[in-house]
Image (cartoon, rainbow, N blue to C red):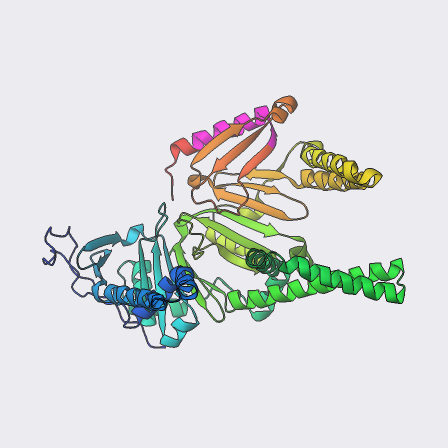
Amino acid sequence: MTAPEPVTPGAPATEPGPVAGEAIAGAPAAEHRLHPMSWLFVLLQQLKQFIAPLIALLVFGQGDRNELWPLIGVGVLALTSLWQYFTYRYGVADDSLVVRSGLLERSLRVIPFSRIHNVALQQSMLHRVFGVAEVRLESAGGRKPEAQMRVLRLDDALALESLIRRRGITTADVAAGAEAAPPLLSLPTAEVVRLGLVSNRGLIVVGAAVAGVSQMTPRALPNLFEQWGERAFGWAMQGEASLSTYALGAASLFVLAVLALRLLSIVLALLQYSGFRLSEHGRRLTVEHGLLARWRTSASRRRIQAFTLREGVMHRMLGRRSLEVDTAVAEDQQQQRALRELAPIATPEACGALITHLLPHSDWHALDWQSLPPHAWRLWMPDALLTVLASAVLGWYLGSWGALVLAWLPVSWFAARARAQRAGYAVNPAIVAVREGWWSRYWRFAEIDKLQSLQLTRSPLDRRCGTATLWLDTAGAGAFAPPLRIRFMPETQARALHASLAQMLAKRPLRW
């Protein structure tokens, strides 16, 4: 692969003049266009948004030459895409990225490199055919990216990413450093297969497919189950099947369904995480992954706000864990490109080594974990109340059969007791950490300098038992990340820890 072309910095940027078309003082010495085929990718992206109205016009707009309206709509979108290509420019001025767009209504956007918290590069199959990439520059707090470039030549995209990462160091030096630096973590194919085994991506896809089919044809799934039931019971009646035959058939179907879902999860994991590579360039972390479509995203280490170490049942069976982070970058539900997974799957030793590397002063392997007082019945109480309520409702409809639900009570009590025994927390001058869970376990921790606020709460149950819950908030908490909290602490102990942490936060600046 050829070395990326460097982006030449120019003079400092200033505010634009009031007259359209007037030369801008301090403009970049060399401005760059998007890739010549960028209009095609913009058009495809717009067609995704307007595909439903265009199909409706094509299907329902028959007669009176209305069938031309979809073609007119596509033509308008194509002209808009071409307009963006001819009016979009970007370049570098001093320590900032300058983006100019528009012809009738001009826009000048100056983005300091220090404000760019995440650089994401995406390559779909079509991107890879044309040798281009989509670049997305994100900062904390905004719902939209600071700049989104569809599309740049791959060399130019890598050069821009390198320039932002190093803030002015030449691209040749960056490329040499990148070649010399070994990756922090790479996943071979066997590890990606294990990731598919421990994940539930297949179930998520099946659930989404079922929801989509139900919306399009509400009777499709009921009809399918009715036909399957008629055939299954018809076969059973003809063969005079026994109860054991029914049980064996149901168990076989369950096993086949589980195997099919796991196989689908493995395929999805291979598509998404093949070639996973976590590398470090200076103070920035970069993740690359994907088989058909490639994703490349990077963020500064100082933007990491909190860590989550997960371990499910399948993780323990395979001797693996997962390490995730929350970064101070806006969450976009449709564009999940922020740096989130440092280690989708890895051995406990590898995860511990990553934590020690990223938090060298945390003493992760030597944390003094404090157990909480026995409180199994408090964790068990919500589950017990729901079980009793469910038994009462089912008993109303099914009679004495509803009492079978009460068999869940001892199981839930055992689970609550196991969770209570594992719960704990650890605090040192560098980090605060919490561990919870039993069937699915997790460790949640953050640097004390990244904490934004502390909150001490007491529920009615806490007041009855003389306990309290301490909440610790950071910026950029993920939507699916567990809360950073210490539950069921004795009130005096909770207040003492709250006062100690508050004093530490008052003396230290917030680093995010």
Query: Is residue 491 shown in magenta?
Result: yes
Q: Position of residue 193 (x, y in %)?
A: 61, 67
Query: Is residue 58 shown in magenta?
Result: no
Q: Position of residue 341 (x, y in %)?
A: 50, 56
Residues 106 and 201: in front is: 106
Q: Is residue 88 left or right of residue 368?
A: left
Q: Position of residue 88 (x, y in %)?
A: 23, 63
Residues 183 and 101: in front is: 101
Q: In which quadrant will I find the N terminus?
A: bottom left
Q: Quadrant of residue 76?
A: bottom left
Relative vertical location of residue 327 with respect to residue 282 in this rendering, above or below = above
Q: Main secondary structure of the magenta part?
A: helix
Q: In which quadrant will I find the C terminus?
A: top left
Q: Is residue 201 left or right of residue 395?
A: left
Q: Is residue 93 left or right of residue 299?
A: left
Residues 163 and 210: in front is: 210
Q: Is residue 394 left or right of residue 85?
A: right
Identified at 53% across, 46% down, the residue is 481
Q: Position of residue 274 (x, y in %)?
A: 52, 68
Identified at 57% across, 41% down, the residue is 434
Q: Which residues are magenta?
A: 488-504
Q: Can I make out residue 319 in this image?
A: no
